[in-house]
Image (cartoon, helix red, strand yellow):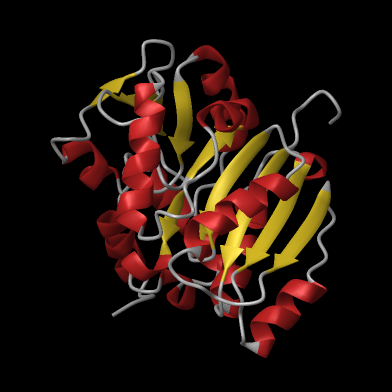
Amino acid sequence: MKNLPIVTLCLTSYNRREKLKNCIESFLKTNLYPIENIEIVIVDNGSDDKETVDFIERLDIKCFGVKKHFNEKNDYPFCLRRAKNQARALASGEYFIDCPDDHLFVVKTDWITNCIEYIAQEKNTSCVCHYAYPEYRFSKPNNKMKRSSVDASFYVSELKGYADYHIMKRQTYEKIGHYREDLAFTPNAESEYMDRSYGMGYRRSMPLVPVSIINEQCYSLTESLSLGEVNQVIPLIEQNRPISNETLTIICKKLNKIS
């Protein structure tokens, strides 16, 4: 689809082959955006696990393109932000999807198109968070979300300008600037970027129906729920909007997938 923008899935990885594999496969399984307009960029933070390295090297997906970058060493925590900058430097996309290797995409909707259309309308949007845990994000006092005036299926943060896992327009990233790699520890780096975004007038947004979860916060769901069973979960997710990790856990228990 030549008239649609290229969207780059920016993945960061380190020694977790199965999580990375499940992340990519779940994205491809649930994604409804034209695959020929999807680019995948993987930045590996110095994995010394041969299986992880081999998996990345052999990865071949029929999409717009696949790019890979291997850092020589893992200088945690400095690599956390550097990898994000590196992924965007490699990306061809007009939009970036920021995603670590421990995410699992569980909702089959054309959320990418929805987010792109929303960002085009809500001009001060820095990014749209795709990560499910809305009970935390909506209820925490300093999040203070309100419904978007241009699209009622999205919420806008009144107090924060950035969300860590998101879809973001390249032009917005270029205006806000790179992540501060010298602010190594995650709280400092994230708060600096959040403050910078907010100070420039940007606000982060969140859809009523998030599309991904973090595996480690949902009892290693990727190890409990096969990709073939994702379709069983989707109708239950749709009945429990907005979804949360806790709700997903209950759903999976109903399916007897976790104890």
Q: Say which quarter of the image contains residue 249.
A: bottom left
Q: Say which quarter of the image contains residue 224.
A: bottom left
Q: Percent x, y for residue 2?
A: 86, 28
Q: Percent x, y for residue 103?
A: 49, 60
Can residue 110 be seen? no
Point out the image quarter for the N terminus.
Answer: top right
Which residue is pictured at 68% across the width and 88% down the height?
50
Q: Percent x, y for residue 143?
A: 22, 34
The mark total stands at 0
Which residue is pictured at 82% across the width and 23% down the height?
3
Q: Is residue 11 left or right of residue 205?
A: right
Q: Is residue 78 left or right of residue 208?
A: right
Which residue is pictured at 54% across the width and 75% down the height?
74
Q: Nearer the viewer, residue 206 or 243?
A: 206
Q: Is residue 107 left or right of residue 196?
A: right
Residue 188 vertical placement versus 123 (above, below): below
Residue 155 vertical placement versus 221 (above, below): above
Point out the image quarter for the C terminus.
Answer: bottom left
